[in-house]
Amino acid sequence: MKAPSWSSTAAAPCAPPWSATSSPAPRRTTAGLGLVLHGAVRDSATLAGLRLGIKALGAIPRKSAKEGAGAVDVAVTFGGVTFRPGDVLHADDDGIALLPEGTVN
């Protein structure tokens, strides 16, 4: 299975799940601060200026619905990968590496 292409500039057909003003602050770890989104963002120019790593499927100008839906500390699966609370995620401009909890000292 081919991994999804992560981009901050590709067009996306749906409303963004996150924008610079729509969501609570993400969690900070000892290594850094960031978000991985299975969807698009808006306000990409503003987001690019933040000290925050963001991996999203794309950017879109359409406003989100802000339904308030969501959960914290639950496993989520997208792109054929399951992200679980406690996993260690490393990301840069070239991609993402996910290490299951307990594999890093």
Image (spheres, rainbow, N blue to C red):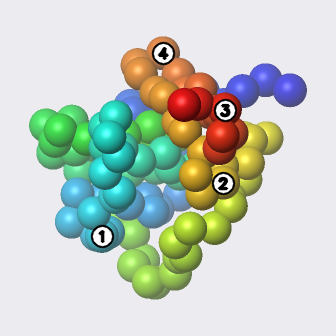
According to the picture, the residue beneath numbered tag 2 turns out to be: 84
According to the picture, the residue beneath numbered tag 3 turns out to be: 103
Q: Position of residue 40 (x, y in %)?
A: 46, 49
Instruction: Say the numbered circle drawn on residue 94.
Output: 4
* CB atoms of marks 1 and 3 within 8 Å: no
Q: Is residue 34 left or right of residue 87?
A: left
Tell me which numbered mark, 4 or 2, is placed earlier along the sequence. 2
According to the picture, the residue beneath numbered tag 1 turns out to be: 24
- In-front residue for pair 16/82: 82
Tell me which numbered mark, 3 or 2, is placed earlier along the sequence. 2
Residue type highlighted by circle 3 = Thr
What residue sits 39% from the left and 79% below the top? 66
Tell me which numbered mark, 1 or 4, is placed earlier along the sequence. 1
* CB atoms of marks 3 and 4 within 8 Å: no
What's the CA distance linking mark 1 and mark 3?
29 Å
* CB atoms of marks 1 and 4 within 8 Å: no
- Tag in front: 3 or 2: 3
Residue type highlighted by circle 1 = Pro
Q: Position of residue 60 (x, y in %)?
A: 39, 49
In the displayed orientation, state which residue is furthest to the front.
105
Residue type highlighted by circle 4 = Asp
38 versus 96 height, above or below: below
What's the CA distance linking mark 4 and mark 2?
22 Å
Could you tell me if residue 79 is visible in this image?
yes
What residue sits 86% from the left and 26% below the top? 1
What residue sits 60% from the left and 57% below the top? 85
| Crowdedness near tag 1: few (<14), some (14–19) or many (≥20) residues, C-alpha within 10 Å | few
